[in-house]
Amino acid sequence: MNQIKVLSDNLINKIAAGEVLERPSSAVKELVENSIDASATKIKVHVRNGGKTEIRVSDNGHGLSQKDLELALKRHATSKLSIENFSNIKTLGFRGEALPSIASVSEMTIQSNDKFDQDGIMIEISSGNLKKIRPVNQSKGTQVSVKNLFFYTPARLKFLKSENYESLLIKRTIQKLALSYHRIEFSLLMNGKEIIKTNPIHKESYFQSLENRVSEVLGKEFVENTLKLDETVDNFRLRGLIGLPTFNHSNNNNQFVYVNGRAINDKSINVIFRLAYRDLISFDRYPQLILFIECPPSEVDINVHPAKSEVRFQSINHLRSLIIRTFNETFSKSGLRTNTLNTRKAVSKINSNFSYQKELTLKEKSYNQGYFQNPESKFFLKKSSEEDKIYPLGFARSQFHNTYVISETKTGIIIVDQHAAHERIVYEKLKKDYYNKDVKTQILLIPVIIDLEKIILDNLKGLYKISSRYGLEMDQFGNSSVIVREIPYILTDCDVKKLALDVIDELIENKNTKRIEKQIDSICSRMSCHGSIRAGRELQVDEMNDLLRKIEETPFSAQCNHGRPTYVELKLKDIEKLFGRK
Ligand code: ADP
Ligand code: MG
């Protein structure tokens, strides 16, 4: 039988490294977090070859004495944890694992100085073995260099991806930290090229400094297309910038979530965002947002995983309803706002068409001009400026291609997609009426009979009473059909058969599978398609203005049920730019 042996420290560290260090970006995270914990105000990160060849982090933090530096490399040696603060940890690190783990799978050099006026100390370790300690010329602070990470652990090395991919993860790591620590100056260089540079922020209000940092790190657009959120309820404070529903993304990479300043990556929170944006965004798109959750340390367990990116909340249900409610309130309060990206896209599109048009022949030009004076486009009377204040979406000027309503506002023009906008209005109305148990119906003069397969009829048993709550009165008729007797009043002009079939589909598909609110959303959504003013229908002026007024009154009406915008706004200054006036 094999003899049992206690593992050597070096071996234990290599095992721990497997957990703490998944890839170069994890080493970057650990080292920068150490700099933050050391109260640094400047942190520089250099990486080469996606961090695979070298990672160098330098800071102006409090530094380490020779004695502490030697200790820091020992396993479970930390200055941050004691029995007193065990359940009230304020630092990012506390497990004392990062330095020994990294040292065990790389060639590491640390130079540090905890004084202003003397030499610092340098230590060199290779694969966990101490090579050298000597004095070094180093100002107050610490510099850690990690070369050839995983070079001697080929199994892990094999899992690393391309330089580009690893670089991207490192960039995201620094972005996340920079979004949370506004007072620290971060810089990230990759193969000598500056990728991120932030300025320190002092004095300004919380949102000024947050928005400033977000612009530096993620770009101006992120600020322009998000709404401010700041709510405190019971033990929780939620703050941040939450994306307009139309400012969505193909994955959840742009959801930055922090708990007490620590960036986390928690699936249960991502699911909550889905719920909060449930009927505002199509199911395959993701909102973009930054959310800082602050709560007493006792509300959350951060010690779930060595990398500390997963957490466990004591009262996740409470947090869930809090997020959903505050997000929805923020959307409603914001009233009418649509994604500025659309405007920008439109403007740049028109600009590029313009340069193309320059090359058109004269004949084509005059044809184009004729087109814009198309007698079919309708222009209407001017309104008084008093009314602007009351009506943010202005007044309908014309309808183009029987699909878009153009309205004039004080600050520009608005182009409304009549179908998308109306669909949203009908949807919200159906939902509101449903919740208020106030669905007005219209009895059909001639009931509509729809033949269905037996298996569908069997499935429908017991579901008719559900559809009647939505104002769709139907019942089995004979052995092979259903009869529709009443429809919601708001859907008066719809194709009853198509409507009923759609609802039947939805009822059967989601029988018992969806939560009740979800069912309400999807049934109302299906029904709203049928009541909508179709694209291609000519509208009278009062119908157009009626539509604008209803958009103004309807919550979340800047996007349709599928997350597409219902209108875009062109500001006068954008239009002036097009004509070279500004
Ligand atoms: P932890 O951060 O969990 O304490 P680490 O292994 O990352 O564990 O670091 C061990 C100790 O080394 C820290 O507790 C801290 O005292 C010290 N240390 C690490 N990095 C720095 C730094 N950049 N500046 C000052 N002290 C540092
Ligand atoms: Mg640490």
Image (cartoon, helix red, strand yellow):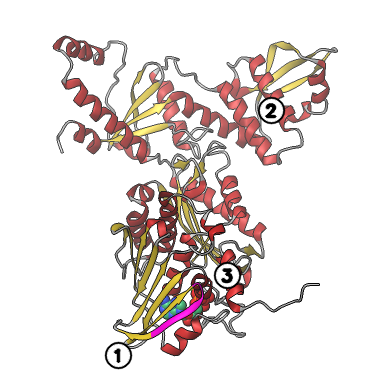
Q: Residue at x 71, y 38 (%)?
A: 514
Label count reads 3
Residue 381 figure quarter = top left
Is residue 432 one of those drawn in magenta? no
Q: Residue furthest front?
A: 1
Q: Which residue is mark 2?
A: 506
Q: Nearer the viewer, residue 302 or 314?
A: 302
**Helix, strand or loop at mark 1:** loop
Could you tell me the amino acid type at mark 2?
Glu
Does residue 90 appear in the picture of this structure?
A: no
In the drawing, does residue 383 fall left or right of residue 35? Answer: left
Residue 89: x and y, percent?
Answer: 56, 76
Inter-mark Cα distance, 2 to 3: 54 Å
Inter-mark Cα distance, 1 to 2: 75 Å
Q: Residue at x 58, y 16 (%)?
A: 493
Q: Earlier in the sequence, mark 2 or mark 3?
A: 3
Residue 167: x and y, percent?
Answer: 41, 54
Residue 305 figure quarter = bottom right
Q: Residue at x 64, y 63 (%)?
A: 312
Residue 298 figure quarter = bottom right
Q: Nearer the viewer, residue 438 or 23?
A: 23
Q: Is mark 1 within 8 Å of ligand 1?
A: no
Residue 245 position (above or below residue 166) = above
